[in-house]
Image (cartoon, helix red, strand yellow):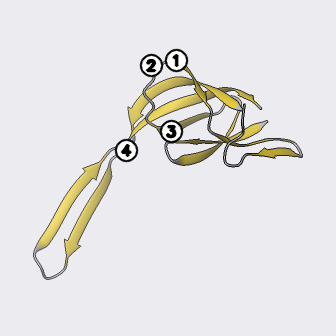
């Protein structure tokens, strides 16, 4: 069984036992959270599609860790104008493990 969930403005296809990183969620490490913005649930040939979300469908996940991604370096330059700007960014994330999918 798989589901397509929406969190942090992005969509993810998840299955039971999957570990993945999402935008930071304010929850403690080890806490169980419920994701209720489910766009689609499928199992074999049967697929349920929400409009836009499925009513009553939930995905339970466990928070494994919090962290920061690798640095992304930003460099802006205008030729012949003596303009250069350097900047860096590290995005925060939360690592989740999917425990169950309930349609």
- Residue at numbered disc 2: 28
Between the C-alphas of marks 3 and 1, the distance is 15 Å
**In contact (CB < 8 Å): disc 3 and disc 1:** no
The earlier-in-sequence mark between 1 and 4 is: 1
Q: Residue 50 shows which numbered tag?
A: none
Disc 3 target residue? 22
Which residue is disc 1 drawn over?
31
Q: Quadrant of residue 35?
A: top right
Where residue 20 sits: x, y (%)? 56, 36
The answer to whether marks 1 and 4 mark residues whose Cβ atoms lie closer than 8 Å is no
Q: Are marks 2 and 1 in contact (CB under 8 Å)?
A: yes
| Near-viewer residue (60 or 69) | 60
Q: Quadrant of residue 75?
A: bottom left
Per the image, label 2 sits on a secondary structure element best described as loop
Establish if 34 lies above or below 12: above
Horizontal side, residue 33 vs residue 91: left or right: right
Front disc: 4 or 2: 2
- Mark 3 or mark 4, earlier in chain: 3
Callout 1 environment at 10 Å: few (<14), some (14 to 19), or many (20+)? Answer: few
Residue at 26% of width from left, 51% of height from top?
Answer: 88
Of badges 3 and 4, the one in the foreground is: 3
Q: Quadrant of the C terminus?
A: top right
Label 3 environment density (alpha carbons within 10 Å; few <14, some 14–19, many ≥20): some
Q: In front of the other: label 1 or label 4?
A: 1
Q: Earlier in the sequence, mark 3 or mark 1?
A: 3
Q: Are marks 3 and 4 in contact (CB under 8 Å)?
A: no
Give coordinates of residue 7: x percent, y percent.
Answer: 54, 40
Q: Residue at x 46, y 19 (%)?
A: 29
Local secondary structure at mark 3: strand
Q: Residue at x 75, y 39 (%)?
A: 2
What residue did someone put label 4 on?
A: 70
């Amino acid at each position: 069984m798989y589901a397509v969930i929406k969190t942090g403005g992005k969509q993810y296809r998840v299955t039971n036992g999957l570990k993945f990183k999402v935008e930071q969620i304010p929850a403690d490490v080890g806490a169980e959270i419920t994701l209720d913005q489910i766009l689609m649930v499928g199992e074999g040939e049967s697929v349920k599609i929400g409009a836009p979300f499925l009513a009553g469908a939930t995905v339970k996940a466990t928070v494994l860790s919090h962290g920061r991604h690798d640095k992304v370096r930003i460099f802006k330059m205008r030729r012949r104008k003596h303009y250069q700007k350097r900047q860096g960014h590290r995005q925060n994330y939360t690592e989740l493990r999917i425990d169950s999918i309930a349609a």
